[in-house]
Image (tube, rainbow, N blue to C red):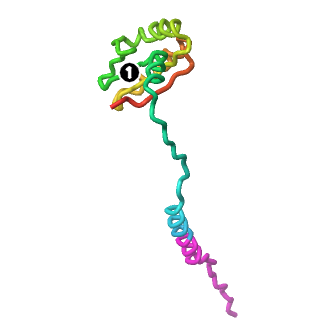
C-alpha cells in the first residue's frame, strides 16, 4: 500500500494590498503637509521714541562680542575674567539696569554662555541676548 504524502503548502501573507495602503497614506500625508500653514503673530513695532531709547540705553549694560571674540562692556574692551566685576559695579550704580548681550553672528557660543553666567553670578537676573546692529 501506498502512503499518502501530505502536501506541505506554506501559508503566505499577501503584502501587495498593505503596500498599496502604505503608499496611499504616504501620498496623503505629503499632500496635506504642504497645505498646513503655521500660524504666527504679525508684530508691528511702533517707531522708537528717541528720548525713551536714550533713557533705556543709560539703564542697560551692553556687552558686545565681536567676530574675533573680543568682549566690550559699554564700548570698553574687557577681559572675560573682568566681566563679572564690571557688571557688579554697573549694577550697583543702577539697579534697574538689565544686561544686554550682543554677539556677532560668528562669535563663539561658549563665550556668550560664559558672559551670561558671569552676569547671573553678578546678581543680574534680567539678561537678554540681542541681535547685533548692522
Viewer-nearest residue: 60 or 120 = 60
Residue 105 image offset from top left, x and y in percent: 35, 32
Residue in the image at 41% along x and 25% along y = 102
Left or right placement of residue 50 versus residue 25 in this view: left
* Highlighted magenta segment, given as a residue range: 1-24
Residue 53 image offset from top left, x and y in percent: 45, 24
Residue in the image at 51% along x and 6% along y = 93
Residue found at the very far left of the displayed protein: 68
Q: How many labels, in total?
A: 1
Left or right placement of residue 58 versus residue 16 in this view: left
- Residue 90 in the image: above or below residue 30: above
Name the chief secondary structure element in magenta: loop
Residue in the image at 55% along x and 75% along y = 20
Viewer-nearest residue: 107 or 97 = 97
Does the magenta run of residues contain 15? yes
Residue 57 image offset from top left, x and y in percent: 44, 19
- Residue 29 in the image: above or below residue 112: below
Identify the image quadrant of the C terminus. top left
Residue in the image at 70% along x and 93% along y = 1
Instruction: Identify residue for label 1.
Output: 64
Callout 1 crowding tier (Cα within 10 Å): few <14, some 14–19, many ≥20: many
Viewer-nearest residue: 122 or 47 = 47
Residue 73 image offset from top left, x and y in percent: 39, 14
Q: Secondary structure at mark 1?
A: strand
- Residue 24 lies in quadrant: bottom right
Amino acid at each position: 500500500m501506498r502512503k499518502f504524502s501530505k502536501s506541505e503548502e506554506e501559508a503566505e501573507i499577501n503584502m501587495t494590498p498593505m503596500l498599496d495602503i502604505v503608499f496611499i497614506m504616504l501620498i496623503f500625508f505629503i499632500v496635506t503637509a504642504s497645505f498646513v500653514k503655521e500660524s504666527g503673530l504679525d508684530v508691528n513695532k511702533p517707531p522708537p521714541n528717541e528720548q525713551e531709547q536714550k533713557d533705556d540705553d543709560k539703564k542697560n549694560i551692553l556687552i558686545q562680542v565681536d567676530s574675533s571674540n573680543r568682549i566690550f562692556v559699554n564700548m570698553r574692551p574687557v577681559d572675560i575674567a573682568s566681566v563679572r566685576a564690571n557688571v557688579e559695579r554697573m549694577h550697583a550704580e543702577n539697579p534697574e539696569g538689565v544686561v544686554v548681550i550682543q554677539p556677532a553672528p560668528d562669535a563663539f557660543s561658549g563665550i556668550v554662555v560664559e558672559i551670561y553666567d558671569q552676569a547671573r553670578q553678578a546678581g543680574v537676573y534680567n539678561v537678554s541676548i540681542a541681535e547685533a546692529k548692522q
